Every structure is written in C-alpha cells, then in structure tokens.
Image: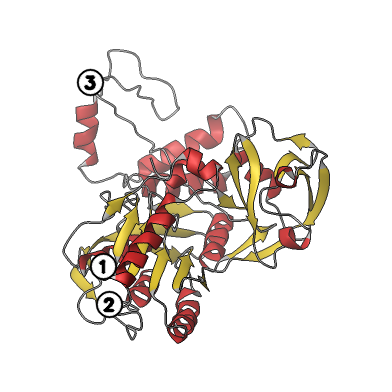
Amino acid sequence: MSFLRKYNFVFIGIAIIGAAFVAGFYLGKGEREITVVNEKGEPIKSGEVTIRPSDVQEYLGKDVDFDLFMTVWNMLKKQYVDQPVSETKLFYGALSGMVASMDDPYSVFLEPQVSEEFTESLNGRFEGIGAEIAIKHELLTVVAPLEDSPAETAGLKARDVIIKIDGESTENMSLDEAVGRIRGEKGTPVVLSIVRVREGENEALDVSIIRNTITVKSVTWEMRDDGIAYINMRNFNTDTTRAFKAIQREVIARNPEGIIFDLRNNAGGFLQTAIDVASAWVENGIIVSERSVDGITTYSPTETALFAGIPTVVLINGGSASASEIVAGALQDYEFAYTIGEQSFGKGSVQVLEDLPDGSSVKFTVAKWFTPDDRSIDEEGITPDEEIELTEEDFSEDRDPQMDRALEYLRNKSSS
C-alpha cells in the first residue's frame, strides 16, 4: 500500500481535480433486455421490440444517427420530472460522457471553471491558507505551513491539532471534508481551533486565517551537515525547470558527497520538465520514448549533466507518478541513481489539453511512455532497487525509514 493512499496528505488550497464520469450506456455481463421508448418517451410494449447487448454492440459499430442525440435531448427537455432542464448542463454532460467512453481515467472534459482551476494548478498557484495537513493518530494535524503562506503568518505550526473548523468539530471528519471546509476564495476568513499537543498545551486556541493565492515552490533543497544534498521536488510545473537549474548550480558549488532526490508523492506534470530534470544526470542517450498513433518519438537530454558522477538516491512511492516515473526510470536504467521506497503509481501516458472557445477544455491521452530500457511505465510503474515501506506507525511517530536507508547508502558509498 502506498504512502499516498494510506495518508493522503494535501496542501490546503490545492484543487485536486478528479474525474470519474459514467458512460451513458452500461451493458454489464451476460444478456439482459433494454427498455426501448418511442419518440414520445413512452415505453414500447413488451414483446414488440427486444434489444439485447449483443445487438447494441453491433449497432454501435455502424454509422451513428445523430438525430437520435437530439431525440433524447428533446425528451429530457420536455419530460424530465425536475424542470426546467439546463441546456448547458445537458451539453456539458454529453461532452463528458463522450470523452468518458474512451474508458481512460486520464481523459476528461473540463467545464470552464474546472478548466481554469486545472490550468492554475499547473502553474503552482492555488487559493487557500497554504498548509499541509494529514490525519495522524486519528486527529486532523498540521504537517507544516508553507513558507510565507497565510497559515504561517497567522502562527500555525507543525503538529498543531485542528479540533474545529469555523466552529465545526473535526472529530470523525474525513480529510477531504476538512480540505473542503478550509479551502476557499482569496480574501475570505477561516477560523481554526487548534491544540498545541507538541508543546503540552490542552487549551484550544482560535486562529483566524485570511485565505490568499498560494504559490507552491515546486522544488526546494538543503545541504545537510554530513555533506549530502537533499532535493525535494513536489511537481513538474511551469516554473520547475528554472528553479531546478538554479538549485543545480547551488548544489555543485557546495561539492556534495551525494544527493537524495525525493520524488515521493510527486504526481508529475509536464513532459518537457521531466526531460530537463533528468538531463541533470543523463548526458547522452534516450531519457524516455513516446509511442502514439504517429509512431515512436524519443527524447534526449536538453541540459548539461551537472550531477553526472555524483552518487544519487531517488526516493519514490505509490504517489510518484507520470513525470516522476520518467525521471526515476531513466536514472534507474542507466544506473545513475539507486532507487529506494515503494512501487510507483504507474501513470505512463501522455495527455494533451485542448482549450475550447467557451473556456472549457478537453484533456485526452495521445501516447504512452517507455523507459530507456523499453520498460512500460503505464499501469506497471517503477519498482525500486530496494523496497522499504513507510508504515502508518512510522508516519504517526515521524519516522522515515526510506530516508534513513538513503542516508546509509550514500555514507557507505562515500566511504568505500
């Protein structure tokens, strides 16, 4: 079980856009009859017409009569019990169903507002308070406020236990519900009642926070006292390449003994950003290949490999997906890094986002990715060189055996 699935911690203000659309026609297993209606919406009498799934499947293979679409549209407009029926809702619902018929969880139709939020998420900007939270010991707990965020400015601290949100108790509240209550529009307030258990306090303290636009740094780093550089990449967004280039120069200037590159819970981002990041280690060859209806496209390094030859450990888990898997897979195939953690997510497909005139957009799959050794990333993921699970108990007690093993590995490397 992956770290992401177990604990599902999130940044407040990050819009997680999930899409699970149900196709308009579900056939199921075996043969079962389907109710047929006439143009007036009246069921045809039993025995007059019988359509079975096999018949429908055969029909769908023929030319489509688009008059049927308008027939159903008009039935709903005139006869649906709850009137009036929104034409916009019908239209967007039809587009959503059409894309969903591809049976691909990554192909979705995004209505204008959701499309705008999705685009903003790719730029690393969100509206909220800027804090990372999780459920620890069955309590809603602050993992950390983001730097220069409203949460930090208001005095929120790591390990603060949130017992109320705007007066509502968080007891038995799911993480998703808590996120929904705390997240909100810029300029609006939210009051969190917190207890500082870490400091031995028992009295609740009300903290009022004004929500704002949050810009999440996609990559940060620190040089440890033992000479090991720790780089944490949260996503592969529009600003990641620029930020990562600056970090590379800073790391090289410190002459590190080794590098820990943390891609845990990094859900990915842009393909080109993944190529740019992997180029820090890969000097020649293919970083990833892409297979589509047009054939095979290969991607090679784009930057100077400043980290080439520096002992590196890549940390991954079940929340490492997409661009994270491209980078981890390339470094593993070339043996430029030792991979520690848990099996990655297995999201090895390429989506394009096409904007539509009304502000909506459609995101759909156009290709699949393969590592330099021709391993499929999609559904399979990256298996770490050394599998170490981070358990629920580890998380609750602030232990990180994956990080501990990475440090041990690099120390042994430098002394050998």
Residue 370 at what x, y percent from top left? 22, 62
Q: Secondary structure at mark 1?
A: helix
Q: Secondary structure at mark 3?
A: loop
In which quadrant will I find the N terminus? top left
Which residue matches tag 2?
282
Residue positioned 22% across, 35% down in the render: 57
Identify the image quadrant of residue 82: top right
Please identify, in this view, whether the residue under mark 1 or under mark 3 is nearer the observer.
1
Residue 126 at what x, y percent from top left? 62, 61
Mark 2 closeness class: few <14, some 14–19, many ≥20 residues within 10 Å = many
Q: Amino acid at mark 2?
A: Val
Find the distance from the CA under tag 1 to the CA under tag 2. Answer: 8 Å
Q: Amino acid at mark 3?
A: Glu
Mark 3 closeness class: few <14, some 14–19, many ≥20 residues within 10 Å = few
Looking at marks 3 and 2 on the same chain, the residue that comes earlier in the sequence is marked by 3
Residues at badges 1 and 2 in contact (C-beta under 8 Å)?
yes
Residue 306 at what x, y percent from top left? 35, 84
Residues at badges 3 and 2 in contact (C-beta under 8 Å)?
no
Which residue matches tag 3?
31
Which residue matches tag 1?
330
Looking at marks 1 and 2 on the same chain, the residue that comes earlier in the sequence is marked by 2
Residue positioned 38% across, 25% down in the render: 37
